[in-house]
Image: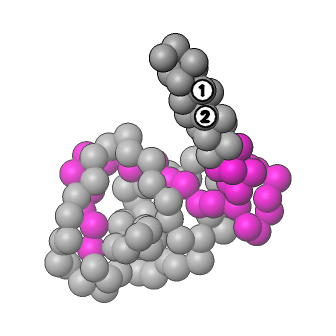
Amino acid sequence: MAGKKGKRRLWIIVGAVAVIGLILLSSGPGRGAGGLCLVKVTADKTPVRSAPDTTDSVGTLPAGLVIQADRKSRSNGFRKVLPRGWVAEQNIDPMPGSNCG
């Protein structure tokens, strides 16, 4: 019984290390144009809009949340955040080492 728990724990650790390694490889600062754009929300209850030119809110984000943003999609003072939505650039700051263009 103890052998099965040990093997299971080992596979969980190996899987976690593999996932962390893939994340670091895909988002490291040395990745140049292919790196991720990560931004930190600076204002509490930041509205998320369906488009940069609308006033309709599809949700809100709490201050301190780190999210992925599109590197190139910017319009009217808004940046597209993934998976969908637009946030005012005045309410977000790029994370150090992020490639936000």
Q: Residue at x 39, y 50 (%)?
A: 41
Q: Residue furthest front?
A: 1
Q: Residue furthest top?
A: 2
According to the picture, the residue beneath numbered tag 2 turns out to be: 11
Region rendered in magenta: 20-49
Q: Is residue 19 left or right of residue 41?
A: right
Q: Residue 47 at x, y = what percent?
A: 24, 63
CA neighbours of label 1 inside 10 A, class few (<14), some (14 to 19), many (20+): few
Asked if the residue at tag 1 contacts the one at tag 2, i.e. Cβ–Cβ closer than 8 Å, the answer is yes
Q: Quadrant of residue 99?
A: bottom right
**In what element is the residue under mark 2?**
helix
Label 1 is placed on what type of residue? Lys
According to the picture, the residue beneath numbered tag 1 turns out to be: 7
**In what element is the residue under mark 1?**
helix
**C-alpha gap between disc 2 and disc 1:** 6 Å
**Can the viewer see residue 30 in this picture?**
yes
Report the disc number at residue 95.
none
